[in-house]
Amino acid sequence: MTTQRRAEPSRRPMSREEALARQERRQRQLERERESRELARGPIDLFFCLLVLLLTAVGLVMLLSASFPSAYYDTKNNDPTYYFVRQGVFAVMGVAAMLFISKINYQRFRGFAKPLLYVSIVLLILVLIPGIGLTRNNATRWLGVGELLTFQPSEIAKVAIILYFSDSISKKKDKMRTTRYGVAPYLLWLVVVGGLVALEPHLSGAILIMGTGAVLMLVGGINWSWVIGAVGAAAGGLYVILFVIGYNTSRITYWLNPWEDAQGKGYQLSQSLITIGSGGLWGVGLGKSRQKFLYLPEEHNDFIFAIICEELGLIGATVIMLLFAALVLRGYWIALHARDRFGALLVVGVTTLIAMQTFLNIGVVTGLLPTTGISLPFFSYGGTALSIQLAEMGIVLSVSRQMKPTKAG
C-alpha cells in the first residue's frame, strides 16, 4: 500500500528588508517589556500609602474603644478584646496584601477581570440558595463556615466590576459613545450583579456596585444623555419601591421622625443621634463613651462613626472626615496622572467605591439618609471586608508606581 505525502507549500525566502523589519519589531517589543518592568519597580505614592495606614491604625483604636463592652457581654469567654484581636489579624494580613499587590504590574490584573466576575456571580447565587448562605439580622449576605471564617460575596463583586469594566472600557475608546458597545453590555452586567446583591437583600451594596459601574462608564466616555436618563430612572424606581410598593416603608417613616417610636422601630437612629449629640465639640474622651454600653446597636460595626463623634467630638470626627477626603482626592490625583487609560479607570473605580461607601455610612449614622446596612471603610468590624479594602488600596499603589512624571506632587 502506498501513501501519498501532501505537498508542502514552498516558502518564499525572507528578503533582507523583511528580516530587518521583523528584527526591529522584536526589538521594540523587548524594549517596551523592559520599560514596563522598570516602571513597575518605581516608587509608590507615599502620601496615599500613609493615609491608608493612618486610617487603618485609627480605625483599630476606635474599634477597640467601641467594641469592648459588647465583646465582653456577647462572647463566650467574656473577652473584651475579641473583636479588636480578630480585626487586628486581618489588618496585618490586609497590609501585607496591599504591599504585595502594589509591587505587581497592574497590567497583569487584566487577566483576572473576567474569571473574577464569573466567580463573584456564582458566589452571589450560592448565597441565595437556602442552607448555603448565612443569615444575620434578617439578611442572607454571607458565605463561610460558622463564625470562624465568613465573607460577603458582594465585596468580591465590587472588585470584579471595577476590574472588568476598567479592562473592557479601556479597549473601546470611541465605541463607548455607542449604545451597542458602550452602554448595553455594561448595563446588563450591572443589572445581573446588582440585582443578585439586592435580592439578599443588600440595597446599599447594590447601590455601591451600580454607582461605581456608572461612574466608570461615565469616565469611559458614554453620552451624558444616558447619565441623565439613568438618574431619572433610578429616582423613579426608588420612589415606586419605597412609596408605592412599600418596601421598607417603616425605615422611611422612622428616618424622617425617629422620635415617633424611639423605643421601637426608630430606636437605632434615635440612639445614634443621642450618641452624636453627647460628644459636643470636643467629645467625652477616648474610651469614655456611655452609649456603647449596649445602648447603641451595631456600635462597633455600621454605627461606629457615632461613637467617634461621642468620644472625639465634632473636632475629632471632622479630622477623620478630612482624612477620608484627602484619601479620595489623592486617589483621583493618581488617576489623573496614570500612565494609561486602564490604570486611570482602575483608580477611579476603587476611589469612587471608597468615597461612596464613606458618604453613605456617615449619611446613615447622622440621619441624612435612611438606615441601611453599610460599613465605614477601615473602621467597622469585618475582617474580610478590611482585607479586601486594603487589597484595593494595593491596586491604587500599583498604578501609582507608573505615574507620569510631574513637576510637583
Image: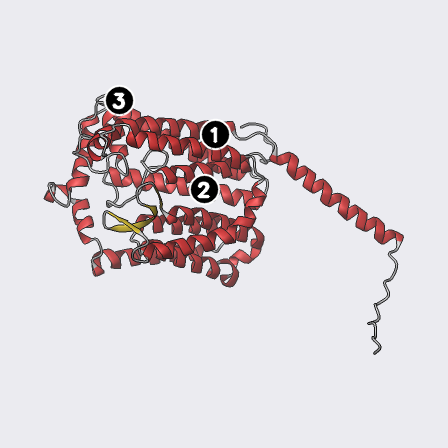
The residue depicted at 84 percent of the width and 49 percent of the height is: 20
Chain-order first, disc 3 or disc 1? 1
Residue contact between numbered discs 2 and 1, judged by CB atoms under 8 Å: no
Residue 317 in view of the camera? no
Q: Is mark 1 on a helix, strand or loop?
A: helix
Q: Residue furthest bottom?
A: 1
74, above or below 164, in the image: above
Q: What residue type is labelled 2?
A: Val
The percent position of residue 177, horizontal first and vertical second, equals 52, 57
Picture residue at 40% right of the left edge, 55% below the top: 193
In-image side of 406 versus 265 (left or right): right
Residue behind mark 2: 350
The amino acid at mark 3 is Leu
Left or right placement of residue 97 versus residue 15 in this view: left
| Above/below status of 176 relative to 103 | below
Residue at the spot x=16%, y=38% of the render? 270
Q: Earlier in the sequence, mark 2 or mark 1?
A: 1
Q: Mark 1 points at which residue?
A: 49
* Amino acid type, residue under disc 1 in the picture: Cys
The residues tagged by marks 3 and 2 sit, at their Cα atoms, a distance apart of: 31 Å
Residue 53, placed above or below residue 234: above
Horizontal and vertical percent for residue 21? 81, 50
- Cα distance in 3D space between marks 2 and 1: 14 Å
Locate the N terminus by quadrant. bottom right
Q: Give percent across and percent down for residue 393.
A: 46, 36
Could you tell me residue 131's position as x and y percent?
30, 55
The residue wearing badge 3 is: 286
